[in-house]
Image (tube, rainbow, N blue to C red):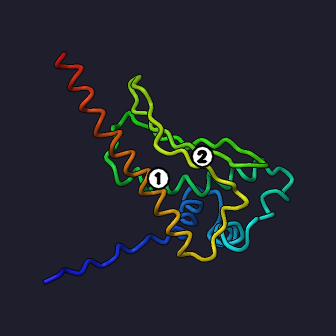
Amino acid sequence: MPTCVAPQASRNWLGYLCESQMSNGSMPSWEAAAYFTDNLFGEAPNPRLHESKSPYESISLFLQRVYNPIVEAATRAVDLPASAMIHVFTDISLIGNSAVLVVYFPGENRPHQLLLLDAARAWDLVFPDADAFNAWAEERYGWIESALKSAVTRQPATEALAVSA
């Protein structure tokens, strides 16, 4: 008898992003909801980021506000060593792809590891609806979580080799 596997429910990433902005004190709930709705949904290109007085800062802030909560969620799924840190870096381009880099620093002077390198044109990072955005965010979450699990589990194996040598 075949078994049915229910599809995994996607998170409400828009709600997660808004909650992140509220909990870190950068925006009240209504402002966060309006910010993400205005910047994530509609027709590409999104002119709001380039029309600001400081487009470089607007794009950098936008990418940080979108990627940081996704990275934070992935770190909650993995048991990180106490000395470890995760950083999200952006390299902003006003005319081409900006780069978002997620880097794992295991601490104790060990080599760091790139978890994600994502090219994004911020003004083209718009979605037709919440389901499309949720799928996009869930994909990045999966990539980061998988790479982070690999990086964290590889670390003890490397230490064991160093101790036995």
Discs 1/2, front: 2
Q: Which residue is drawn at 30% across and 79% down?
A: 6
Say what amino acid the circle numbered 1 marks: Glu
Looking at the image, residue 13 sits to the left or right of residue 36; the answer is left
Looking at the image, residue 44 sits to the left or right of residue 4; the answer is right
Q: Mark 2 points at which residue?
A: 100
Residue 47 coordinates in the image, percent (x, y):
81, 63
Say what amino acid the circle numbered 2 marks: Val
Residue 128 coordinates in the image, percent (x, y):
63, 75
Q: Mark 1 points at which residue?
A: 72
Residue 123 coordinates in the image, percent (x, y):
73, 60
Vertical comparison of 108 with 140: above or below: above
Vertical comparison of 45 with 26: above or below: below
**Rendering quarter of residue 99:** top right
Mark positioned earlier in the residue sequence (1 or 2): 1
**Rendering quarter of residue 28:** bottom right
Residue 84 coordinates in the image, percent (x, y):
40, 36
- Of residues 56 and 31, the one drawn nearer to the viewer in this rendering: 56
Q: Quadrant of the C terminus?
A: top left
CA gap between label 1 and label 2 equals 15 Å
Q: Residue at x 64, y 57 (%)?
A: 26
Kindly indicate whether the residue at mark 2 contacts the one at mark 1 (C-beta within 8 angstroms).
no
What secondary structure is marked by label 1?
helix
What secondary structure is marked by label 2?
strand
